[in-house]
Amino acid sequence: MTTPHISFEFFPPQTLDASFRLFETVQALAPMGPEFVSVTYGAGGTTRKLTHDAVGTIHRNYGLTVAAHLTCVDATRAQTLQIAESYAEVGVTQIVALRGDAPQGADRFTPQKDGFASSVELVEALAKTGKFKIRVGAYPEQHPDAADADADAHWLKAKLDAGATSAITQFFFDADTFFRFRDRCAKIGINAPLIPGILPIQSWAGAKRFAARCGTRVPAKLDEAFTTATRDGRQDLLALAHCTALCDRLIQGGVSDLHFYTLNRPGLTREVVHALGLAPEVQLEKVA
């Protein structure tokens, strides 16, 4: 069995304290040898400049392969492609191309005038430049805007046909959720890498809020277990056990990549990766 690759997601800081936390997280996780790291946009593209700055700093100072998030929200086609070009100019040639969430205060995504109407259009335009390795999002459970679960697989195929080379999934709590999605994808001819997104549970209340926003099912038994563990002060132990068991089951099921949503807190992610035996730490040489 091949040792899976790991990757990490960070989000850009909006305060000085958050800046320190981001780069402490990068410093803590970079020695684990991630295949790549990604940096998100805020809701509605609100952290566009911060994302660009964080991407450049991580790429320049830590020598990591960075995949910059890019969305269709609140920008024209020309503006969006200029952002992509600015990444290429600093040596960042991987992009996670997403439609993006609706801007704050809006009920649903509406394309900007002269903007990209969908992630498929964005992928097509990025692919035509010939400058980027393009990753996209995938939804193992039904996306809030999708007609049904099969529609998510077909939409993913459209993004891959448009030029994307791999997909990172939304997080889930049960490995069977991912395996069922993988089967649906295989049935319609998808053979590109599907990278499961893993959420180490820093806060159960916070994880449930995330799940409600993106349509992720919360298993009743897991909810009961975290409620009890939180009451007894054992939530950190349960979080480590749950995340490690989830990843191990995915690996046993043939998964070759794991993408961790770190929330800019490295501790639990690092413990899980060590528990799985995936990344013996090496000395990181910071790039001048």
Image (spheres, grey):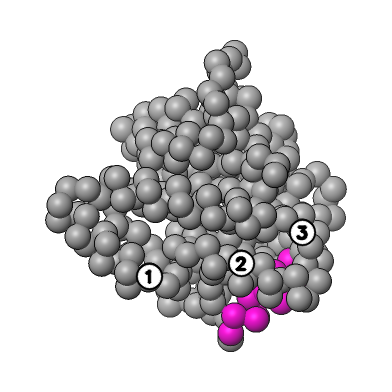
Question: Which type of secondary structure does the marked residue at label 2 adopt?
Answer: helix
Question: Which type of secondary structure does the marked residue at label 1 adopt?
Answer: loop
Which residue is rendered at x = 73% and y = 52% of the image? 134
Residue on which the image places disc 3:
192
| Residue 51 badge | none
Q: Is residue 157 magenta?
A: yes
Residue 105 sits in quarter: bottom left
> Does label 1 or label 3 sit earlier along the sequence?
3
Report the span colored magenta: 148-159
Mark 2 nearby-residue class (10 Å; few <14, some 14–19, many ≥20): some
Q: Are marks 2 and 3 in contact (CB under 8 Å)?
A: no
Spot occupied by residue 246 in the image (x, y as percentages of width and height): 48, 55
Work out which quarter of the rendered image holds the N terminus and state it.
top right
Spot occupied by residue 226 in the image (x, y as percentages of width and height): 26, 59
Type of amino acid at the residue the image marks with label 3? Ala
Residue 107 sits in quarter: bottom left
> Residue 271 vs residue 111: left or right?
left
Q: Is residue 109 above or below residue 265?
A: below
Toward the bottom, the furthest residue is 147
Q: Are marks 1 and 2 in contact (CB under 8 Å)?
A: no
Work out which quarter of the rendered image holds the C terminus and state it.
top right
- Cα distance in 3D space between marks 2 and 3: 15 Å
Type of amino acid at the residue the image marks with label 2? Phe
